[in-house]
Image (cartoon, helix red, strand yellow):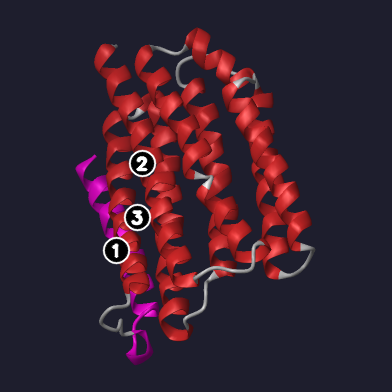
Amino acid sequence: MKKLCKYIIAFAGLTTGQAVLAASGDSMMLESGDFVGYSFWLISMALAAATVFFLMESLRMGGKWATSLTVSALVTFIAAFHYFYMREVWVSTGNTPTDFRYIDWLLTVPLLMIEFYLILSAITKVAGGVFWRLLIGTLVMLIPGYMGEAGYMNATLGFAIGMLGWAFILYEIFAGEASRVAASAAPPAVQKSYNLMKWTVTIGWAIYPIGYFFGYLAGGTDMGTLNIVYNLADVLNKIAFGLFIWYAANEEMADA
């Protein structure tokens, strides 16, 4: 086990180091007062640290919670790698890294939604329909949003379809089958984590459509401020989301 842990830490350090090297060079020097660039750097390192933490905890706990914690590690790892490159785009060009953000979201947001299914599956039998509804809902939310922001379709239409996908997700986790399973079968610690996760999807995710609206439908907004807000939102929506799952796993195992 100790040897395996060393390999995991070495792998995480190697891949993170490669991302740092890819994002290095004279053109990549942060200028004094570039708070947007600082936010990209700080959050990329926080995501990398969270990856190691979730991997180590998945090994320590093992069993039925290993998959949920490993998926949390995948989310933060994918996001950390993208953040190094988003920092490169910002520092080099001063442009918002829209394409990188959506590539990140297309990979990490479905994984976050699947976490609802995984934490419930760790404590009871859950129908596969929950998995597929949450997965499809995220794709309906994200793909039209990207097409609207990137100019492949009307921005208003992309926004409207994306909001329908988000509403579908909220229905499932608040009033759908996933919610009913959590209320009837989950122990208190899992119910608490489930509630924190669903409110994260409600409040934390609201930052993104608000940014979309002001950036593309309401005459535009300051891109620097918007990037800082998006970056801070990812701390809640990725790292804290994983910590809620870790709390449920830790408490449930302690009570077992």
Q: Which residue is mark 2?
A: 240
Residue at the extreme left of the image, as rendered: 2
Please name the amino acid that badge 3 sits on: Leu
The residue depicted at 55 percent of the width and 37 percent of the height is: 113
Circle 2 packing at 10 Å, graded few (<14), some (14-19), many (20+), is some
Residue found 33% across the figure and 91% down from its top: 26
- The residue to which callout 3 is attached is 47
Q: Which residue is farthest top?
A: 184
**Above or below for 108 versus 167:** below
User: What are the residue bounds of the magenta stretch?
Assistant: 1-28
- The image shows residue 244 at horizontal and vertical percentages of 36, 32
Residue 210, position in %: x, y?
56, 52
Percent across and percent down for residue 50 are 31, 49
Q: Quadrant of residue 132?
A: top right
Question: Disc 3 or 2, which lies upstream in sequence?
Answer: 3
Crowding at dot 3, Cα within 10 Å, few <14 / some 14-19 / many 20+, comes out as: many
Instruction: Name the quadrant of the C terminus.
Output: top left
**Residue 111: within the magenta?**
no
Q: Depth check: give the residue in front, 180 or 202.
A: 202
